[in-house]
Each structure stands twice: as structure tokens, then as C-alpha cells.
């Protein structure tokens, strides 16, 4: 079965929505970790680490799917500045989906903290132990997460603009939903 040229492939759509849920969850968990000093803090960290690695792995898979399957073209009448913003924001989202988990992993390594995915599965450190590096990477991780949130909100706003105002098929290319004429 061939896909319509104005739709993303099924794998890209599934990965997009799965990662959207995971990333939004991760942002809320991160805020909860920063705001909490209770016993929930350890529980949130135990979720945050494997979720971050899952996002990293899914981002790699998603990038491979994207490189192997050309995305649908943007509408021909879309202004050049909006096309540039679309391309730039997508590149930024991919960079952040890969970079933030790696910076988090490096931060934990620099702090001497293990990255445990489960009770028996521990990832190796990817950065030498250093208090200064830990502090820098911790701030970088937080600032990159804020940049991801802002980029995500801009992406969501653009999707709603295309779906509700322009009704040009950009949103439906990722949802798979087609309005009956």
C-alpha cells in the first residue's frame, strides 16, 4: 500500500505522536523534579532517566525514518519566511531531541551519578567526574529544556494555524485525518 504524497509515512506519524507525549511528560517531570524536595523527587528521577534515554533512542529512529522517507511538501503559497521558520524549527526540534538527553547523561556522569534504566541495567558514564562540568551541564540541560518547550509551543501554534485557519493539509499530513469534502 502506497502512501499519499501529501502525508507522512505511518512510522513517522506514530513516532511523532509518541514522542510528543513523551516529551511533554518529560517536561512536566523535569519541572516536578526541580520544584520538589520530597520523597517524590527520587521517584521522578527514576522515571526521568529511562524516559530520557527512550527519547534519545526514538529520536535516532525518527531521524532515520525522516531521512529515508521524504516529508510532504509545504503548501506552494506559504510565504518564504514561514517556510524558513518551519524548516528551522524542525531542525531545532531534532537537535534538541538528541542533545538534551545526551547533555543530561553527561551531566549525571560528571556528577558521578549512575544512569540506571532498571535495577540491573546501568549505562556507562560518558563524561569524566567533575563538579564544575556537572554545574555547567546542569544549567545547559535546564536551558535547553526551556528552549525545547518554547520550540514545542511554536510548533503547536503553527500546527493549529495550519489546521484551523489555513486548512491547507499541513496538520492532516501528520494526523492522517482527512476531512470529507
Image: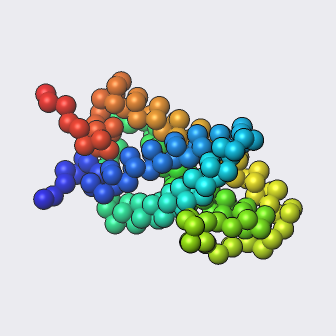
Image quarter where the N terminus lies is: bottom left
Identified at 40% across, 35% down, the residue is 159
Q: Is residue 127 visible?
A: yes
What's the image's color scheme? rainbow
The image shows residue 88 at horizontal and vertical percentages of: 52, 48
The image shows residue 59 at horizontal and vertical percentages of: 47, 60
Comparing 156 with 86, the one in front is: 156
Q: Is residue 118 left or right of residue 136?
A: left
The image shows residue 21 at horizontal and vertical percentages of: 45, 44
Q: Is residue 7 left or right of residue 57?
A: left
Comparing 141 with 92, the one in front is: 141
Image quarter where the C terminus lies is: top left
Comparing 46 with 145, the one in front is: 46
Farthest top residue? 165
Comparing 87 with 27, the one in front is: 27
Identified at 78% across, 74% down, the residue is 128
Farthest right residue? 132
36 above or below 121?
above
The image shows residue 2 at horizontal and vertical percentages of: 15, 58
72 above or below 108?
above
Identified at 19% across, 54% down, the residue is 3
Quarter of the view holding residue 150: top right
Amino acid at each position: 500500500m502506497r502512501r499519499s504524497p501529501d502525508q507522512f509515512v505511518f512510522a513517522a506519524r506514530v513516532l511523532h505522536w509518541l514522542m510528543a507525549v513523551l516529551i511533554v511528560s518529560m517536561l512536566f517531570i523535569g519541572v516536578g523534579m526541580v520544584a520538589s524536595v520530597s520523597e517524590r523527587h527520587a521517584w521522578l528521577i527514576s522515571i526521568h532517566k529511562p524516559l530520557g534515554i527512550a527519547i534519545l533512542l526514538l529520536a535516532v529512529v525518527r531521524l532515520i525514518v525522516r531521512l529515508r522517507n521524504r516529508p510532504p511538501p509545504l503548501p506552494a503559497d506559504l510565504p518564504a519566511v514561514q517556510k524558513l521558520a518551519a524548516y528551522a524549527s524542525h531542525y531545532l526540534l531534532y537537535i534538541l531531541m538528541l542533545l538534551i538527553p545526551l547533555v543530561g547523561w553527561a551531566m549525571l556522569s560528571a556528577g558521578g551519578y549512575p544512569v540506571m534504566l532498571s535495577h540491573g541495567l546501568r549505562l556507562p558514564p560518558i563524561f569524566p567526574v567533575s563538579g564544575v562540568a556537572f554545574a555547567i551541564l546542569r544549567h545547559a540541560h535546564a536551558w535547553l529544556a526551556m528552549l525545547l518547550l518554547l520550540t514545542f509551543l511554536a510548533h503547536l501554534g503553527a500546527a493549529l494555524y495550519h489546521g484551523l485557519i489555513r486548512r491547507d493539509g499541513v496538520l492532516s499530513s501528520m494526523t492522517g485525518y482527512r476531512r470529507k469534502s
